[in-house]
Amino acid sequence: MGIKQCSRPSKLLTAMQSTAEGASQNVITQIRETYWWVVVGVIAGIAVMALYLLLIRVAVGLMVWGSIILTIVSSGFGAFYFIYNSMKLKEKNELAQIYFGYVDSTDEKKAKMYMTFGVILAIICGVAILLTLIFCKTIRVAIAVIKSAM
């Protein structure tokens, strides 16, 4: 029943009420059918959380240092990848200019974009290395505090 078909507001309200009742009945029916899965999911979530907390107690140092090292390695590799691809695109563009007499503007834009991403990632890598070297003792103390607190 559309709005134009309703001659009185009471018909519209009745239609809206019946639609809301139907939707709520559908939701209630679905909850009744699947509440066991919800309970199992909650219990599994609690078990995974408890296991994670136990793992943190044992491997907090590995997790902290691993995440620091992975951040440095991934940003360094990303910088290398983007700068290398930028240089390859520039070389390809130079060869195209020499042999064919034209420059592909999309390759030029890609090369600039790759170089920009590479420089940004190289800066992130350098800052991460410097911060790690500066705060090495502080990170060790923080790991010891976390181990003793748990």
Image (cartoon, helix red, strand yellow):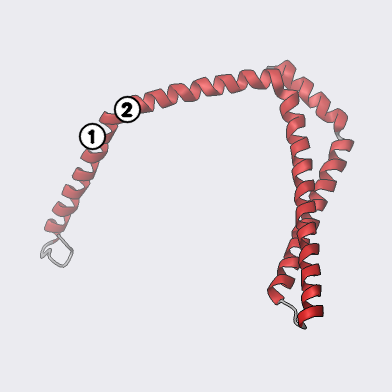
- Compare residues 111 and 122 and report the one nearer the observer: 111
At a point 16% along the width and 58% down the height, the residue shown is 12
Amino acid found under the numbered disc labelled 1: Thr
Amino acid found under the numbered disc labelled 2: Tyr
At a point 61% along the width and 21% down the height, the residue shown is 53
Direction from residue 51 to residue 131 in the image, left or right = right
At a point 82% along the width and 52% down the height, the residue shown is 123
- Compare residues 52 and 101 and report the one nearer the observer: 101
- Compare residues 98 and 34 and report the one nearer the observer: 98
Which quadrant is the N terminus positioned in? bottom left
Q: CA distance from mark 1 to mark 2?
A: 10 Å
Do tag 1 and tag 2 residues touch (Cβ < 8 Å)?
Answer: no
- Compare residues 101 and 55 and report the one nearer the observer: 101
Q: How would you rate the neighbour count of disc 2 (Cα within 10 Å): few for under 14, some for 14-19, many for 20 or more?
A: few
Q: How would you rate the neighbour count of disc 1 (Cα within 10 Å): few for under 14, some for 14-19, many for 20 or more?
A: few
Residue at disc 1, secondary structure: helix
Give the x, y percent position of residue 71.
75, 41
At a point 82% along the width and 25% down the height, the residue shown is 140
Instruction: Please tell me whether residue 105 is drawn above or below residue 44 in the rendered image.
Output: below
Give the x, y percent position of residue 112.
76, 67
Residue at disc 2, secondary structure: helix
Give the x, y percent position of residue 22.
19, 44
Q: Residue furthest bottom?
A: 101
Quadrant location of residue 4? bottom left
**How many numbered circles does the render carry?**
2
Direction from residue 140 to residue 19 in the image, left or right = left
| Earlier residue among tags 1 and 2 | 1
Instruction: Please tell me whether residue 90 is drawn above or below residue 13 in the rendered image.
Output: below
- Tell me, for residue 35, which label it has, or none: 2
Direction from residue 106 to residue 65 in the image, left or right = right
| Residue behind mark 1 | 29
Direction from residue 46 to residue 70 in the image, left or right = right
